[in-house]
Image (cartoon, grey):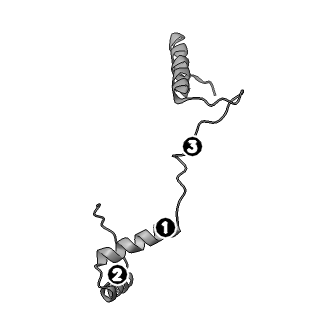
Amino acid sequence: MIKAHVQIPDDLYHAAKKVAASKEWSFAEITRRGLEYMTSVNQVPNTHSDWTLPLIKGGETVSEEALAKASQAERDAFSQIGQNPTNNNDVEH
């Protein structure tokens, strides 16, 4: 369990303490329940876990391994000609 330090307006704190006392709960318990309720009714979609690489010609997906190999090949090619592909200082403006 994580301990958290939060700032709460005085009136909200006192109202929460009254509710907690009426239910015979601790302030920590009413805070946890309030957070559980808010996170259950305001669920944020997890956009990172279901993400996959986009499709390319032929309808095949690009694996992370293939992407890493292509990236390394590009870095190797640039290093052979003495340029850094991530350095934009070589570009004339």
Image point (36%, 82%), residue name: 16
In this rendering, position of residue 92 left or right of residue 42: right
Query: Where's the C terminus, which quadrant?
Result: top right
- Which residue, given by chain and number where applicable, does mark 3 sit on? 51
In this rendering, position of residue 65 left or right of residue 60: left
In this rendering, position of residue 40 left or right of residue 4: right
Amino acid type, label 1: Ser
Marker disc for residue 40: 1
- 93 versus 52 height, above or below: above
- 26 versus 82 height, above or below: below
In this view, the residue farthest toward the right is 58
**Depth check, front residue: 73 or 31:** 31
Residue 41 location, x and y as percent?
Answer: 52, 69
Amino acid type, label 3: Trp
**Depth check, front residue: 77 or 71:** 71
Residue 62 location, x and y as percent?
Answer: 60, 29
In this rendering, position of residue 10 left or right of residue 56: left
Q: Is mark 3 on a helix, strand or loop?
A: loop
Q: Is there any visible trace of residue 4 in the rendered image?
A: yes
Q: What element carries label 1?
A: helix
Q: Which of marks 2 and 1 is nearer the N terminus?
A: 2
Image point (52%, 10%), residue name: 80
Q: In which quarter of the image is residue 6?
A: bottom left
**Depth check, front residue: 88 or 25:** 25
Q: In which quarter of the image is residue 57?
A: top right
- Which residue, given by chain and number where applicable, does mark 2 sit on? 13
Query: Where's the N terminus, which quadrant?
Result: bottom left
* Mark 3 Cα shell of 10 Å, populated few (<14), some (14-19), many (≥20): few
